[in-house]
């Protein structure tokens, strides 16, 4: 059945839609409309048509397929009650992106008045690897209108809520009146805007982006040359820093501004306490009134270069399914994260992600920040991390990933059963602990058992003047390559590598005391490595530097490479 739009109330209430001469299709789950699914309506609709979707939970993954159509709930059409958005739900069922625009859609493609939830993103190339992008909405080379939507509880490697990108110097989506909240990004947070896209954030019907979580920049990340200034109603913190918002000033114009009129939280200038039996409505200020979610504590705490802060983690098992934990946890300068005990404070990552991420670079700073500033001055201590993985992206790491960190310590940490290799070519194996472009590194009582992928521990740089590493009581046992399958892409295994390469690195200064590395395997099963699989311990640098091994036990290891199964120490040639 087709219905011609003759409803006077539709015309009066809905001035944003050009519907007077279009065809109305009604989508109702009770069967009294034209369709019971939105997908069926998209397939039938022609340019200019409108799908009017009645309340219900629609478990679907939508693609506009280049059509200039309006898909709208009742809000802004027959109702001005915003609560109806909560009743009109498009649920991605954790099976990819919820809504996709990837066929040159224009602003005649409109999505209005829905709760967009439960998306996991779809794999697309991002940088040099393929990663899960756009959990809720994925826009590429398109300019749709997204209005009056609640985009929440979605997840992806980058752009947990929305990933918006173009490779054509075209594209200008319009966002108006949306609430983007409670989304999760493994690497980048809720909204990521890339390359030459210019996303218009409506200046009258303001958007809000708050209380999202990610390994980096949980609210917004921008690396588009064309992005115009943005005004939003609410960010998590009004006077944001790079923890909440990332702006790549190598790409974004110097006059770019992001302004928030309101904030959702007030940072707390005190130590905080977390327990698996806590509650996120507690104050978190005492052990008797703890928060439950570690990520919330990290968001709430106010770092201070003059007063070190600590997040105290009580004993117990912390996981997504048991107590709503959100991993990875984003590390902040001047904030220590201390468990009760190495054996009793356990992070169970459930094969979904890594535990900690502290990643930045020289361009990701808001105005007036240091021109080059590390994530610095922190300790992570007294934890066990188990069951890490990287199903959402090729740059994943099994447990800990750090870029541009300084003056930090990892102490009394056991990491076990973290596996980053995969049979899927989109999910490339990486390291259990990966530390890049960092210095003044202290590792004490770090135990890595039964992990797989690339090396258990990799510390490397090509971009800092020198690198200092002090390790004491490091144990690496039974580390293996990733899985061997016909379409394998993953890591070659091996125990540890510490190296510098390329200018301007001057050298590395490494002291390892009481190192144990046993029953590790490195093999050239990954075709990209050919016959170059290395020894289980590799340490090399450029000019200068010093390497000291004191009381090292390296035995019962295996390597398929010509370099031998135990250790390779040397100087990297300048042309490498």
Image (cartoon, grey):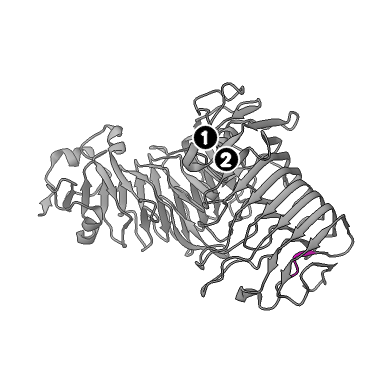
Residue under pointer 2: 244
Q: Residues within 10 Å of mark 1 (few under 14, many from 20)?
A: many
Contact? badges 2 and 1 (CB < 8 Å): yes
* Spot occupied by residue 93 in the image (x, y as percentages of width and height): 35, 51
Residue 478 appears at what percent x and percent y? 68, 60
Mark pair 2, 1: CA separation: 8 Å
> Going by the image, does 63 lie left or right of 370?
left
Relative image position of residue 163 (x, y in whole percent): 46, 53
Q: Is the magenta stretch mostly helix, strand or loop?
A: loop
Which region of the structure is painted magenta? Answer: 534-538
Please give the name of the residue rendered at 74% of the width and 33% of the height, measured from the top-left corner: 305
Q: State which quadrant residue 233 falls in.
A: top left
The residue to which callout 1 is attached is 236
Q: In this view, does 236 lie to the left or right of 148?
A: right
Say if 453 sits above or below 315 in the image: below
Depth check: 316 or 235 in front? 316
Badge 1 marks a residue whose secondary structure is loop
Q: Is residue 368 visible?
A: no
Residue 149 horizontal/vertical position (percent): 35, 42
SS class, disc 2: loop
Q: Pick the quarter of the image with the C terminus.
A: bottom right
Front-most of 417 and 362? 417
* Residue 131 visible within the image: yes
């Amino acid at each position: 059945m087709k219905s011609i739009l003759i409803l006077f109330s539709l015309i009066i209430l809905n001035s944003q839609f050009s519907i007077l001469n279009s065809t109305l299709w009604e989508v109702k789950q009770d069967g009294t409309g034209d369709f019971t699914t939105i997908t069926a309506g998209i397939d039938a609709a022609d340019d200019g048509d409108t799908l009017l979707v009645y309340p219900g939970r629609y478990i679907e993954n939508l693609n506009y397929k280049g059509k200039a159509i309006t898909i709208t709930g009742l809000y802004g059409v027959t109702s001005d009650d915003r609560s109806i958005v909560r009743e009109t739900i498009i649920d991605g069922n954790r099976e990819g992106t919820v809504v996709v625009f990837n066929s040159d859609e224009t602003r005649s493609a409109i999505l209005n008045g829905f709760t967009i939830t439960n998306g996991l993103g779809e794999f697309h190339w991002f940088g040099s690897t393929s990663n899960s992008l756009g959990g809720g909405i994925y826009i590429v080379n398109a300019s749709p209108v997204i209005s009056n939507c609640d985009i929440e509880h979605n997840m992806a490697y980058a752009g947990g809520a929305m990933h918006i990108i173009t490779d054509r110097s075209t594209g200008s989506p319009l966002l108006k009146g949306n609430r983007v909240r409670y989304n999760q990004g493994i690497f980048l947070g809720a909204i990521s805007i890339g390359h030459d896209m210019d996303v218009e954030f409506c200046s009258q019907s303001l958007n809000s982006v708050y209380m999202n979580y990610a390994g980096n920049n949980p609210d917004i990340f921008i690396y588009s040359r064309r992005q115009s200034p943005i005004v939003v109603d609410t960010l998590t913190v009004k006077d944001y820093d790079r923890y909440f918002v990332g702006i790549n000033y190598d790409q974004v114009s110097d006059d770019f501004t992001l302004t928030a009129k309101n904030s959702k939280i007030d940072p707390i200038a005190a130590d905080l306490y977390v327990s698996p039996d806590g509650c996120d409505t507690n104050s978190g200020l005492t052990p008797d009134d703890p928060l439950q979610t570690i990520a919330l504590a990290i968001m709430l705490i106010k770092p201070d270069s003059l007063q070190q802060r600590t997040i105290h983690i009580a004993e117990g098992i912390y996981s997504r399914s048991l107590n709503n934990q959100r991993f990875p946890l984003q590390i902040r300068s001047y904030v220590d994260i201390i468990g009760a005990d190495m054996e009793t404070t356990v992070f169970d990552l459930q094969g979904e992600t890594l535990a900690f991420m502290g990643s930045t670079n020289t361009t990701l700073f808001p105005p007036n920040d240091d021109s080059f500033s590390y994530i610095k001055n922190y300790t992570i201590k007294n934890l066990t991390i188990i069951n890490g993985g990287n199903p959402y992206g090729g740059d994943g790491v099994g447990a800990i990933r750090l870029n541009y960190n300084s003056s930090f310590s990892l102490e009394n940490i056991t990491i076990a059963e973290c596996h980053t290799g995969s049979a899927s070519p989109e999910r490339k194996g990486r390291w259990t602990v990966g530390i890049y472009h960092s210095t003044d590194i202290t590792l004490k009582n770090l135990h890595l058992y039964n992990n797989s992928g690339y090396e258990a521990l990799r510390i490397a740089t090509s971009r800092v003047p020198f690198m200092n590493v002090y390790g004491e009581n490091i144990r690496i046992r039974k580390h293996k390559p990733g899985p061997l399958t016909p379409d394998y892409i993953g890591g070659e295994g091996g125990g540890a590598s510490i190296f510098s390469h390329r200018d301007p690195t001057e050298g590395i200064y490494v002291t390892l005391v009481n190192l144990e590395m046993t029953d590790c395997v490195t093999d050239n099963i990954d075709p990209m490595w050919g016959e170059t699989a290395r020894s289980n311990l590799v340490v090399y640098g450029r000019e200068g530097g010093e390497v000291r091994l004191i009381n090292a036990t390296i035995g019962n290891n295996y390597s398929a490479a010509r370099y031998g199964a135990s250790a390779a120490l040397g100087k990297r040639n300048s042309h490498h």
